[in-house]
Image (tube, rainbow, N blue to C red):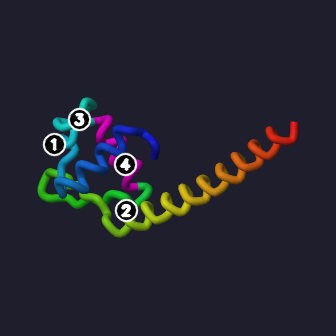
Amino acid sequence: MADPTRWQVLQLLAERGEQTATRLAGLLPVSRPAVIKHLTTLQQHELVSSRRLGREVLYSANPSRLIETARWMETVGTTWQASLLRLRALAEGTGQSR
């Protein structure tokens, strides 16, 4: 999920609404097959949904899942920040006792 292009695909869908893989590929420095691979991964994580309209497949961001993911990331970030602060305090305490 950490791939920068994948995040660009998700951001474009969130900002511009429904898009085809072809249109997304035109906005990114990657091929249409690469965009489809990113969309597939995003769909597997339920961050993107798709619907068929005639011969085209339209992709869109899943707002509820994005909100849930953002909350999870905030929780993880807070946990890491607290851990790093404890580690820093420990390191500074260890450094002072030498």
Compared with 25, 93 (above or below) is: below
Name the image quarter holding the C terminus.
top right
Residue topped by disc 2: 66
Say what secondary structure mark 4 lies in.
Answer: helix
Indicate left or right for 71 with 26 as reference.
right
Residue topped by disc 3: 28
Residue topped by disc 1: 23
Indicate left or right for 24 with 7 as reference.
left
Q: Quadrant of residue 76?
A: bottom right
Compared with 34, 87 (above or below) is: below
- Taking the spot 25% from the left edge, 58% from the top edge, the residue there is 60
Residue 36 drawn in magenta: yes
> Of marks 3 and 4, which one's residue comes earlier in the chain?
3
Judged from this view, the residue extending furthest toward the left is 54
Say what secondary structure mark 2 lies in.
Answer: helix
Mark 3 against mark 1, which lies toward the viewer? 3
Q: Are marks 2 and 4 in contact (CB under 8 Å)?
A: no
Q: Position of residue 62 (x, y in %)?
A: 31, 63
Q: Which residues are magenta?
A: 33-43
Residue 26 drawn in magenta: no
